[in-house]
Image (cartoon, rainbow, N blue to C red):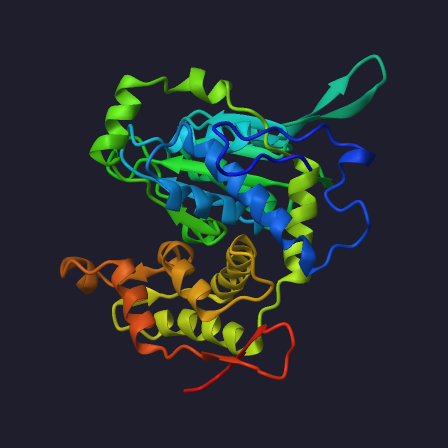
Amino acid sequence: MSLSSSSAPVPAPVPPTGPASEPFPDGSPGASALPLFRECFQALGDNIERVVKGKREVVDLALTALFAEGHLLLEDVPGTGKTTLARALAASLGADCRRIQFTPDLLPSDITGVSVFRPQSGDFVFMPGPVLTNIVIADEINRASPKTQSALLEVMEEGRVTVDGTAHAVPRPFIVVATQNPVDMAGTYPLPEAQLDRFLMRLSLGYPDHVSEVDVACGDSGSAAVDRLPVIATAHHVAEFTDFVRSTVAVARPVGDYAVRLAAATRGSPHVRLGAGPRGSVALVRAARVRAAAAGRAYAVPDDVKALAGPVLTHRLLLTPDAELAGAGAADVVAEALATVPAPRPLHDASEGDGSRRTAAKR
């Protein structure tokens, strides 16, 4: 893979997918390939930040969701760059991308596809919908009816759509990047809890700082700038790196135990009607692996779990009416869990020659 250093003004695109461009031409990668993944992660972030300015933390979280094979919900007021981030992510990858503008009259078959009868052959032919692609940009997802929103439930969880009894698998990588406006309630349908739980993370960009906003106002931004972004990694590379992270980055049992205890703590909060379920703790561990690999580590640590708890868990919580009246938020519940659940302490094992870190539960 040919990637420029982070100091270069424009990251260099990778060559087209082929035998000569395999991320790991020597076969199964080991921990020695971590610098290559870190370089790719950094180059993708640098590329996206050329159009999404001053939001590197959010950009890195979006990339974490991509390599963790999770889906992303961008929720913020209009004009903060939600769709720009989604399009910049798609433009940085040599992957198929489809955008769906969700409207009240959108039908489930407009997303999944439909079987069409052909008189010439006398049979039905499946016409795939826009969801059968690598990156789905679901713009203003809460403007479609619940019936249409439910068309994404199967594909977001199982990576396939079933039409007329036949399952059709989506390609890898596959990610749904959905946007919604949380303040404009007219003509919208709130996402049901089952669908919210299928998003790995919910992120908010917020308004840019003054310098970044001046850069956006005076510089080249919008669709034209996104369209000129170079391709940094192909879909094949992303799939290879995803498998690499899953098979190489270790999560010690105490770290996994910590993630589960954090999710369980949200269920026991008096401010919550419904806490984070097992899907939340699984998502937390998956995202922690990617964050560790992006930092150049072959092992996850409790700090990885802590840093991701907010984006991964908050949208999975349902607060009680009393908590909402008191002004408490889901972020407060997660913060309380982080403050009350003790984290395992990392220990260095001097007997290991490479100085790698082992994590033991010390409570």
| Viewer-nearest residue: 175 or 28 | 28
Q: How many labels does the image show?
A: 0
Q: Position of residue 75 (x, y in %)?
A: 34, 41
The C terminus lies in which quarter of the figure?
bottom left
What residue occupies the far right of the structure in this picture? 121
What residue occupies the far left of the structure in this picture? 326
| Viewer-nearest residue: 167 or 41 | 41
In percent of the image, x 51 and y 67: which residue is there? 278
Q: State left or right for residue 317 relative to residue 146.
A: left
Q: Where is residue 175 in the image (x, y as percent from the top left)?
A: 56, 41
Q: Position of residue 231 (x, y in %)?
A: 59, 27
The N terminus lies in which quarter of the figure?
top right
Q: State left or right for residue 154 relative to residue 185.
A: right
| Viewer-nearest residue: 217 or 38 | 38
Residue 151 appearing in the image: no
| Viewer-nearest residue: 149 or 130 | 130
In percent of the image, x 41 and y 29: which residue is there? 83
